[in-house]
Amino acid sequence: MGMSTHVLDTMHGTPANGMAVALYKLERGRAMAVTAFTLNSDGRAPQGLLYDSSALETGNYRLVFEVADYFRSRGVVLPDPPFLDAVTLDFGVADSTRHYHVPLLVSPWSYSTYRGS
C-alpha cells in the first residue's frame, strides 16, 4: 500500500535508469515539494515507496519526470527545444488505504500513463 512509480523507456526498451523525478503535494493551488530522486536500474525510486500506507493522504499530487535530460544522457540527439522536456503528471488520491502506482511509458516523442497496481 502507498504510492510508487516506475518508468519504462520505450525508445530503448529498458527501464529509465538515471531519470530525475520530483514529487509534489498540491495544496491550495501550490505545489509543495515532497521528494526528488533518480530512478534506479529497474526504473523505480531507490527508496521504493514514495509514501507508505501510513503517510499517504487523500488529495492531489504531481510527479515531474525529466524526460529530455534523461534521453540526452543516453546519447539521443533532441531538437532545441525538445518535443518533450519535463513530463508533468497531476493525479488524485481518493482513497489513501489503496495503493497508487503511477507508471510512465516514455520516448522523446510520446508518453502514456495509467493507474497501475
Image (cartoon, rainbow, N blue to C red):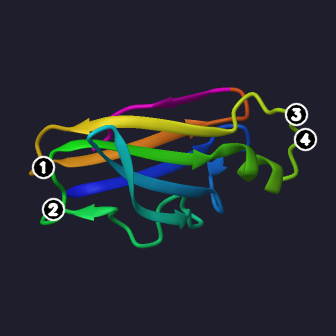
User: Label 2 is placed on what type of residue?
Assistant: Ser
Q: Earlier in the sequence, mark 2 or mark 4?
A: 2
Cα gap from disc 1 to disc 4, whole angstroms: 41 Å
Marks 1 and 2: in contact by CB < 8 Å? yes
Q: Earlier in the sequence, mark 3 or mark 2?
A: 2
Magenta stretch bounds: 110-117
Measured along the vertical axis of the image, is residue 73 above or below residue 47?
Answer: above
- The question of residue 84 being in magenta is answered with no
Disc 2 is placed on an element classified as: loop
Cα gap from disc 3 to disc 1, whole angstroms: 40 Å
- Pointer 4: what residue? 77
Prevalent SS, magenta region: loop
Q: Is residue 13 visible?
A: no
Instruction: Using the image, tell me which numbered label, if any, was put on residue 96.
Output: 1
Marks 4 and 3: in contact by CB < 8 Å? no
Disc 3 is placed on an element classified as: loop
Q: Nearer the viewer, residue 63 or 48?
A: 63
Q: Earlier in the sequence, mark 1 or mark 4?
A: 4
Locate the C terminus and report the quarter of the image it occupies.
top left
Q: Is residue 10 visible?
A: yes
| Residue 93: % across, % down | 21, 41
Q: Earlier in the sequence, mark 2 or mark 1?
A: 2
User: Label 1 is placed on what type of residue?
Assistant: Ser
Mark 4 crowdedness (10 Å alpha carbons): few <14, some 14-19, many ≥20? few
The nearer-to-camera label among 3 and 4 is: 3
For the point 45% across and 36% down, the residue is 89
Q: Quadrant of residue 83?
A: top right
- Pointer 2: what residue? 53
